[in-house]
Amino acid sequence: MLSPARTGAALLTAGLLAGLAAGPALADSASPSPSPSPVAAPAALYGKSDPTYDGVWRQSLALTALAAAKITPADSAVAWLTGQQCADGGWPSFRANTAAACTVSTEDSNATSVAVQALATLGGHQDAVDKGVQWIKANQNADGSWSYNPGTPGDANSTGLVVSALRAAKTDPSTVAKAGKDGLQGLASFQLGCNTPADQHGAFAYQPDTKGALAANALATAQAALAAAGGSLPVAAGSPTGRAPQALSCTSDGAYVAPGEAASAYLTAQLASGGKHLMLTTPGATPTPDYNATAWAAISLVRAGHPEPAADAVAWLADTAGTWAKGPSGTDASATATLLLAAEATGHNLHAFGGTDLVAQLTAAGPAPKTTGAKKQAGSPAIIIGFGLIGGIGAGFFISMNRKRGQRTGK
């Protein structure tokens, strides 16, 4: 059975469902048809579902999330990911036969981007990271954007993921250009401005329509906002409070609002109107909660300096997203990893997330890790400081603190 995370990413006909799983951007053109028979997941891969469309994606997210949680993954899991890299530096969605040469047109910017971020987070894989960056540079579109597969029009999700990967690799995206258009300009081309309805200002569109018009897209905005805010995966938790994001001003005397701020304002408004979560809307279908976009929005908002709406969104996920992370073939590794990254960014207890130990759930879905790290104390956020009483017999301070502080980088 195909993984729900990448079926939507690889097949345009299923593309409208991409927000239901933790998958990457949609391809804007026809992709390979589903396999006539499911491919068995390799032992070194996280998750047991068919990896054809999401093998590299889910492995990369899983490794990033575990590393952020201070878990050292199994060598076999990391070797599987590096072994999927093509000779030219890119990654496809999945290589069943790594002895066969890759086809450039089927290499995947989304898989490459998250693989670069995972290996940069793990450290010790600079050659693979450098080759990935070279592939990214070689496959940039003339408008500065990136597409899901090379040779097709760019989209906001893919461009945002690539910009985040460049930052993770310590490469300034403003220096990566094609035909005079750099990566940040490519990303900005998908952002809605003052010539659009007021409630869409600051959002990102997936792609322009046939007439060149842009329409707000929840997942595109949630993923692109991380790059627009100057970030990449993983995002570390910071202060639990912050100012409200500044909305795009369209008055003649309005001050400049950075792309990340405008996107954050849009996401914050959408989360508020949606009951602390984003909605997936597809033509002819009843809107449904979009767990994936909500998790990405929380990660992006924390990176942009707006942790309070992010915390509300992740609290909603903790209450509702358990079944999303458990796919038809068992644990959905990409969904669980995305929740883990969102929980980490907002300071939630990774071992008691809505009654689920996310770390245990993810590690059980793949090869046993080399080290398991220390569990965080129960509660949310993950920093809990108890001040002991100083009194007559024996005084003490009881301090429980276990939180990661640090920041890295991010269709």
Image: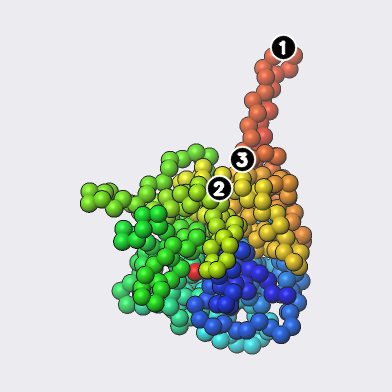
Comes first in the chain, label 3 or label 1: 3
For residue 237, the mark is none
* Residue for badge 2: 275
Residue at 76% x, 71% y is 43
Q: Position of residue 40 (x, y in %)?
A: 75, 77
- Towards the viewer: 149 or 403: 149
Tell me which amino acid carries mark 3.
Answer: Pro
Q: Position of residue 6 (x, y in %)?
A: 62, 72
In space, the residues marked 3 and 1 are separated at their CA atoms by 32 Å
* Residue for badge 3: 381
Tell me which amino acid carries mark 2.
Answer: Gly
Up the image or down, 274 lies above or below 396; here it is below
Residue at 34% x, 52% y is 248
For residue 392, the mark is 1
In space, the residues marked 2 and 3 are separated at their CA atoms by 21 Å
Task: Tell me, yes or no, if residue 240 can be seen here.
Answer: yes
> Are there few (<14), some (14-19), or many (20+) residues within 10 Å of tag 2?
few
Helix, strand, or loop for circle 3? Answer: loop
Comes first in the chain, label 2 or label 3: 2
> Are there few (<14), some (14-19), or many (20+) residues within 10 Å of tag 3?
some
Q: Nearer the viewer, mark 2 or mark 3?
A: 2
Comes first in the chain, label 1 or label 2: 2
Seen in the image, is 232 located left or right of residue 8?
Answer: left
Q: Position of residue 9 (x, y in %)?
A: 57, 73
